[in-house]
Amino acid sequence: MKRQTVCIQGLGFVGAAMAVAVANAKDSKDEYYFDVTGIDLANKAGIEKVRMLNKGTFPFETTDKALQTAVKNTLKSKNFKAGVDPEAFSKADVVLIDINLDVYYDKQQEPYLNLDAFKRALKTIGQHIKPDALVIVETTVPPGTCEKVVKPALESELKKRKLPANKLKIAHSYERVMPGDEYYNSIINYWRVYSGIDEVSSKACRDFLSKIVNVKDYPLVKLGSTNASETAKVLENSYRATNIAFMEEWGRFAEDIGINLFEVVNAVRKRPTHSNIRQPGFGVGGYCLTKDPYFAKLATKELFGLNNHDFEFSSKAVKLNNKMPLVSLNKLKKALGGISGKKILLLGVSYKQDVGDTRYSPSEIFAKEALKQGARLTCYDPLVNVWPEANVKLLNKLPLNLNFNAIVLTVAHSEFLSARFAKKLSMSKAVIFDTNNVLREEQIKILKNNKLMFIGRGDL
Ligand SMILES: NC(=O)c1ccc[n+]([C@@H]2O[C@H](COP(=O)([O-])OP(=O)(O)OC[C@H]3O[C@@H](n4cnc5c(N)ncnc54)[C@H](O)[C@@H]3O)[C@@H](O)[C@H]2O)c1
């Protein structure tokens, strides 16, 4: 049987991994289901991702062996290529949209929507696509986008090409991919939600996903409309961001009354109803939790023309989470008697443990403010070589000489969790500030003679 052709628009953290998963999908006779083409923009970053994927290398630092193996395998299977020529969409039976859709901020730091880049991407697809193709939006979008933006944009391009627009299938199925050790697994062995703009689209999306996702163990969840599944994505991320923000004041309380909030939280988590309560920390970063909680509020006004939903809770959560790194900075400032001229070693600049992604990382907020206030900052992250967002140079290994006023631990990367690492820190006279529950109890014992500070702990 002829393989279906799949095109993936956007080869970022999600699209690159999804492209690899689609290319590796096989039927019961061990035959590959699809011929896959990944498309990115013809700019420097896009071309580099294409180049790496075409030589069998994942374009981002990853600790996930399964993903590395799956990318390499595409060289053997010969059913995958990456490129920048949108002509590829003309052959696609299925198009996956995995591009970014950013939230913008005005001078008062209030969020607003600008869909121009997203609409340009849709136009590119519409200019080439077959009239009966299936387009699945995986990008996290404001509720209402598939119906009010994607459908009209694609139909309009088909009409310009004098092609029928009534056979096009449009579906929405958002990604829950988790970069880290389980990166690849989080695509194929994980629950998925999907929906279509009509029953035909919904069914086509289900059939497609069933070939990639392990639906036997992780059955797909169908929602009644694209508005509903778009809402599901922004609701789940708003919930997560709010849950984290909720813990902030409890962290301060614990520090002041002399208790260990992590111990408290672990006790609370024993209740199945409270098992995912978060914990205090350094802040919230990454591309998703920092913007998704704004999407429902923005969609209310800009896509549904309503004025009556402010989503006060979710908006407050993002603002509070953004302030968290400054709480750590202020604590440090107090401990050091000022920050200007102080030598600070920042350990961890990505937003998450064992992930090299620095987008919207809390370390960026901390570093920029510390530098503004005159701190002499040195930064190291075992998974990051360049830190474009902060424009700060990074060391490529932990410095031998730990002659600093403070060492700030921000991310629980594996390299920071050993007794050896703690012994190294113990040689320093610096204040050691664990802002994110990085240090294990045995490491804390090794550091008992050092001056230690914590977020969320007042017991030490
Ligand atoms: N990163 C995550 O962990 C994660 C998890 C779940 C969902 N998401 C969502 O998935 C979407 C993508 O996220 P990401 O982290 O992969 O973003 P990303 O910025 O890493 O990747 C987006 C890619 O799309 C490319 N692109 C943009 N416009 C294009 C166009 N017109 N044609 C071709 N390529 C284009 C960009 O060059 C970039 O390579 C977002 O909506 C995000 O919120 C991300």
Image (cartoon, rainbow, N blue to C red):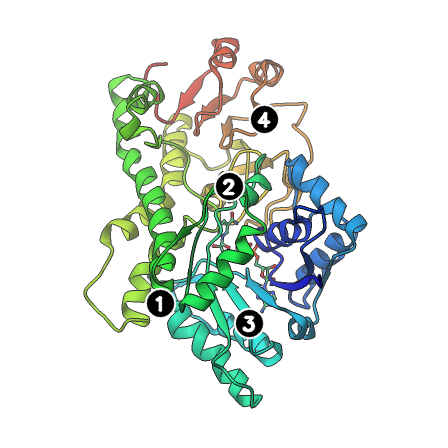
Q: Quadrant of the N terminus?
A: bottom right
> Of tags 2 and 1, which is closer to the observer?
2
Residue under circle 4? 414
Callout 2 touching callout 3 (CB < 8 Å) = no
* Cα distance between the residues tagged 2 and 1: 30 Å
Amino acid type assigned to the residue bearing label 3 in the image: Ala
Amino acid type assigned to the residue bearing label 2 in the image: Lys
* Cα distance between the residues tagged 4 and 1: 41 Å
Amino acid type assigned to the residue bearing label 4 in the image: Ser
View extreme (left): residue: 308
Q: Nearer the viewer, residue 30 or 308?
A: 30
* Cα distance between the residues tagged 2 and 3: 34 Å
Amino acid type assigned to the residue bearing label 1 in the image: Gly
Residue at position x 30%, y 35% in the image: 248
Q: Residues within 10 Å of mark 3 (few under 14, many from 20)?
A: some
Callout 4 touching callout 1 (CB < 8 Å) = no
* Cα distance between the residues tagged 2 and 4: 33 Å
Residue under circle 3? 121
> Of tags 2 and 3, which is closer to the observer?
2
Q: Secondary structure at mark 3?
A: helix
68 above or below 107? Answer: above
Q: Position of residue 49 (x, y in %)?
A: 69, 56
Q: Is mark 3 within 8 Å of ligand 1?
A: yes
Residue under circle 1? 144
265 above or below 394? Answer: above
Callout 1 touching callout 3 (CB < 8 Å) = no
Residue at position x 69%, y 35% in the image: 396
